[in-house]
Amino acid sequence: MLRNEGERVTETVDSSQKILSTVDKLWGEEVEFLQTIARFPSTIEHEGSLQLYLKDFFQNELQMDVETVEVDEKEISSLPGYAPSEWSYAGRPVVVAKAPRSIQESKGNSLLFQGHVDVVSPEPKHKWSVDPWSALQIGNRLYGRGVLDMKSGVAAMVYAYKAIQEAGYEPAADFSIKTVIEEEATGNGTLAAANAGYLADAVLIPEPFGQCPSTAQLGSIWLRIHIDTSSNLQSDRTGVGANAIEKAQTIIEALQSYREYVNRDEQKPPEFAHMKEPIDVEAGTMHSGDFASNIPVEATLEVRSAVYPGKDPAEGKQDLIDWILDKTKDDEWLREHPPSFESFGFHAEGMIMPEEDPLFARLDEAHEFVTGTRCGRQAIPVTTDARYYGLYYDTPVTCYGPSGAKMHEPDEWVDLESVKNVTKVYADFLIRWCGIHKKKGDT
């Protein structure tokens, strides 16, 4: 005889409470796990050691079925969302861990938790008040490069599953954890794994923008600008036409005026209308000169610009190039010797995800059950790997993660209480989305 709805709900609440209590029981272990993975200096091209550690943890600690995906740039280079990379992919796999199921009958939807393990450089290290790789806990904060973006989220998704496992349950539908590389520069790790078929009915990414699901995000483009002021004129005794650093300043002024232009109110989509400057246009690096008594004849700027959803990144790049050429034409040298431009790194589209999808309703329920509060929605003024699923693989996706501050800055920190709450929300969301069974052999 079928049980009534009231009995089913009571059973779900009882199992959720047991699993959330297990999160509390495992909390000290989760913090130690977060500190361990945060101490790997996993900047881009150096994620391999951490990925090997996680592969071993998934296999031996969680008894998950683990596979790896090597990024084949030739294979993915023709796919939508590919970005040109300048790093070797040798020894830097994507790791995919699938939860084993003792009961094959499915009663829910498949789910993928995905986090990136690459982090940005900690430089300048002397600006930190702690060792950026120490994962030092001070009060209820954990400090270190990458603890917020996004190793705390990785810890939360891992221990959400471990709590379910320790409580004697297993997902009633396919559930996987994926850790990817190079999210901070291209996203090619996610693209390679998705192209290899590692997908699900929904994807949750623990980007650290607080406990509020994202429904919109910006795209991002990277552009390298080369300035060469060496002179080819035989009559020029010095061989120098102009100071490359000074000409770079003219280009920086053009970037600043472009930022003002693209952030005008009439340019903003409704999702970003409340933000003063959603489109960030910045020179992130500058390389020029080698000696104080030499006039520099070469300069290279590496520039990042966001783009709104619906804007082709190639069109965004061309708009920026055209703007720079137009705004620097009053400079006689740059008019006659325009800079050259090179694409590298991000070539990412923005995305809007319909919040009517059941993914958001189940996540709302989990958030309210754990925190006792309702959660809203947010547009995030950055790009994330969520775009691949929403734009190219027709998969519902959102970002929801812990809170902290100084992401990509010295003294980055994460609020540990938010990590515990997020772990509980992930666990309850997994129950609601996948369903759970008692593992065979458990009473």
Image (tube, rainbow, N blue to C red):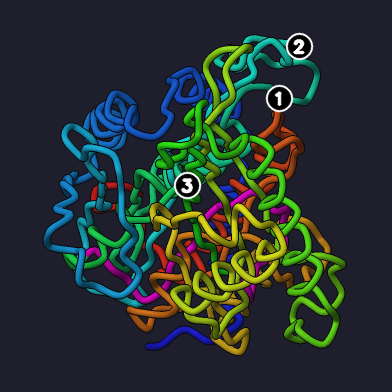
Residue 201 among those drawn in magenta: yes
What x and y, as percent, mark residue 70? 16, 46
Kind of residue at badge 3: His
What's the distance in space between the residues labelled 3 and 1, CA to CA?
29 Å
Task: Give the residue number, with chain letter if any, for mark 1.
Answer: 410
Q: Earlier in the sequence, mark 1 or mark 2?
A: 2
Q: Which quadrant of the structure image shows residue 385?
A: bottom left
Residue 39 image label: none
**In screen coordinates, is 295 left or right of 370?**
left
- Stretch of the chain drawn in magenta: 198-218
Left or right: residue 69 versus residue 297 is left
Taking 284 as reference, is 414 left or right?
right
- Foreground residue, 79 or 194? 79
As measured in the structure, the alpha-carbon distance from the residue carrying label 1 to the one carrying label 2 is: 8 Å
Disc 1, SS: loop
The residue sitting at 20% across, 56% down in the picture is 102
Q: Is residue 52 visible?
A: yes
In the rendered structure, find residue 226 and report the number of the disc placed on it. 3
Q: Nearer the viewer, residue 315 or 440?
A: 315
Of labels 3 and 2, earlier in sequence is 2
x and y percentages locating residue 41 in the rendered image:
44, 21
Give the residue drawn at x 52%, y 26%. Answer: 238
Is residue 16 within the magenta segment? no
